[in-house]
Amino acid sequence: MRICKVCNKRVVGRTDKIFCSIKCKNNYHVQLRSMTAHAALDIDKILHRNRSIILELLGNDRDQLHIDRIEMDKKNFHFNYYTHQYMSREGDTFKWLYDLGWIELSNREMIILRE
């Protein structure tokens, strides 16, 4: 006997059917989209905040800046959130937030740069 994923009622019909009604199916997908949207908004806020921190440190007139990691920590920069990364032939990993990025040279020293 198959049970509806939403309301736990008995499912009648095709063998691959997982919801008892269109209403349950719609409710399930609305809730799923809502949870995904909230997670995406939270991550997007962190990404934009990180980009603002790099932009503030870099300023308008520089394309590259050597900086101590502590300076970014003080501004509550989240190092695990970035849009993409690139590994150079030398094995250095550049992490990017849209058009701004960074590379960690050591545990303390890093370079922030503009693409």
Image (cartoon, rainbow, N blue to C red):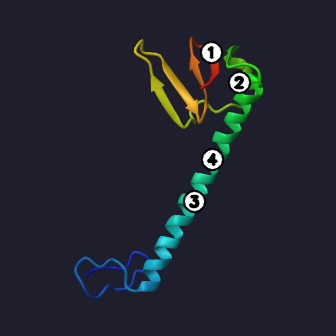
Q: Which of marks 4 and 2 is nearer the N terminus?
A: 4
Q: How far apart, in angstroms, are the residues tagged by discs 4 and 3?
A: 10 Å
Q: Which residue is drawn at 60% across and 23% down?
A: 102
Q: Which residue position is annotated with label 4? A: 44
Determine which of the numbered discs, if any, sits on residue 72 in the image. Answer: 2
Q: Which residue position is annotated with label 3? A: 37
Q: Which of marks 4 and 1 is nearer the N terminus?
A: 4
Label 3–label 2 contact, CB within 8 A: no
Question: Going by the image, does 104 lie left or right of 12?
Answer: right
Q: Which of marks 2 and 1 is nearer the N terminus?
A: 2
Q: Label 2 amino acid?
A: Met
Residue 18 lies in quadrant: bottom left
Q: Earlier in the sequence, mark 1 or mark 3?
A: 3
**SS label for mark 1:** strand
Tell me where residue 44 appears, x and y as whole percent. Answer: 62, 47
Q: Note whether 90 is above or below 78 in the view shown.
A: above
Residue 67 lies in quadrant: top right
Q: Label 3 amino acid?
A: Ala
Label 2–label 1 contact, CB within 8 A: yes
Q: Which residue is drawn at 63% across and 16% down?
A: 111
**SS label for mark 4:** helix
Q: Label 1 amino acid?
A: Met
Q: Label 4 amino acid?
A: Asp
Query: Foreground: 10 or 63?
Result: 63
**SS label for mark 3:** helix
> Residue at the left extreme?
15
Q: Residue at x 57, y 17 (%)?
A: 104
Determine which of the numbered discs, if any, sits on residue 110 in the image. Answer: 1
Q: How far apart, in angstroms, are the residues tagged by discs 4 and 1?
A: 24 Å
Q: How far apart, in angstroms, are the residues tagged by discs 3 and 2?
A: 28 Å
